[in-house]
Image: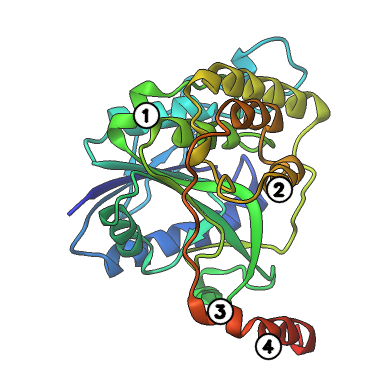
Amino acid sequence: MNSFAHIINVVSELENKSFFEIQKVTLASFVRAKNHSSSHQIEQLLCYHKDFPVKTETNFKLVSPLEKSILDIGNLNNKKALPLLKDILQIAYHNSDADYIIYSNADIGIMPQFYSAIDEYIKSGHDAIVINRRRIKSTLNKVEDLDSIYSELGKPHVGFDMFIFKRTLFPKFILNNTCIGIPFVGNDLFYNLFCFAEKPVLFNDKHLTFHIGMELLKDWGSAELKKHNYTEFRKTTKALLPQMDITKFPGAELNFFKRHFKWLMNPTLSYPELFVTDLKQLGKKRNKKVYDPNYKKQSYYEWLMKYINFD
């Protein structure tokens, strides 16, 4: 049975009160998921920046505080001590011997069956998994709402915020100075997983995580920080270009125009590297997706249901 080390960066109430309240729901969902999968070996690690110490949380392992932040990188006007993603992953790697490391944002809750389901996906051959969150209404925002939260199907989101990967992959990663809490962080980790894992997978439709709030786009951080993270993200994708095998990437099995349209329109991907790699590897065999044979027979009713159902 696989063991897991799941790390998130937590904030103090002083640092961000509104986020701190949402974080309570996340941590409560972690406790329930660990109890649900009590037969698995699961470590739940909390890290934080040294300038904003947090109280010791029961059931969690509080690791050594992060010494660095975006304030130590370059000459930025930003005054927030936003941690660097690579430092958080490094802490998880050095504070656990678990077979698999899990990183997620502190506002991403998990379903009770999360760890058990992940273990099954790993047993099926996946050594890296990215799960896109389900968005739920913002009125369900308290720990006592958890049962109602679990009952919500939610709506999909394209952002990457839950990553599971084999521990032995981490030393191979190429990560630059993206900071958490700002767009493009996590996209760099996504590319590393799909370059170095043997059988990575992106799940867009699994009912395994939740995010409180229905927004698809949120104006996080300053233009300066967004530019910084984008620059660091592109440094990573360019450095990873020689490692890219296009057949591992989501959408590679689609026809030429469909896959390029999806890659180009997806804001979380870096299209130039996918375009170059795809042209160089056009002759590579692509694995076709296996569909339920009954789905096509029901396609008209699926379409009809979409338009007659009430939201």
Q: Which residue is drawn at 48% across and 74% down?
A: 292
**Which callout, 2 or 4, points at the residue further toward the start of the chain?**
2
Q: Under tag 4, what secondary structure?
A: helix
Q: How far apart are marks 2 and 4 (CA)?
A: 25 Å
Q: Under tag 1, what secondary structure?
A: helix
Q: Against 152, is 18 above or below?
A: above
Q: Distance between the residues labelled 4 and 3?
A: 10 Å
* Residue, disc 3: 295
- What type is the residue that disc 4 sits on? Tyr
Q: Are marks 2 and 1 in contact (CB under 8 Å)?
A: no
**Which callout, 4 or 3, points at the residue further toward the start of the chain?**
3
**Which callout, 2 or 3, points at the residue further toward the start of the chain?**
2
Nearer the viewer's eye, disc 1 or disc 4?
A: 4
* Residue, disc 1: 91
- What type is the residue that disc 2 sits on? Lys
**Which callout, 2 or 1, points at the residue further toward the start of the chain?**
1
* Residue, disc 2: 262
Q: Residues within 10 Å of mark 2 (few under 14, many from 20)?
A: some
Residue 5, horizontal then vertical, whole percent: 31, 44
Q: Are marks 4 and 3 in contact (CB under 8 Å)?
A: no
Left or right, 237 with reference to 213: left
Q: In which quarter of the image is residue 81?
A: top right
- What type is the residue that disc 1 sits on? Ile
Left or right, 227 with reference to 88: right
Q: How crowded is mark 4: few (under 14 residues within 10 Å), some or many (20 or more)?
A: few
* Residue, disc 4: 301
Which of 6 and 208 lies nearest the eye of the viewer? 208
Q: How crowded is mark 1: few (under 14 residues within 10 Å), some or many (20 or more)?
A: some
The quarter in which the N terminus is drawn is bottom left
Task: Say whether residue 306 is visible.
Answer: yes
**Which label is found at residue 276?**
none
Left or right, 102 with reference to 74: left
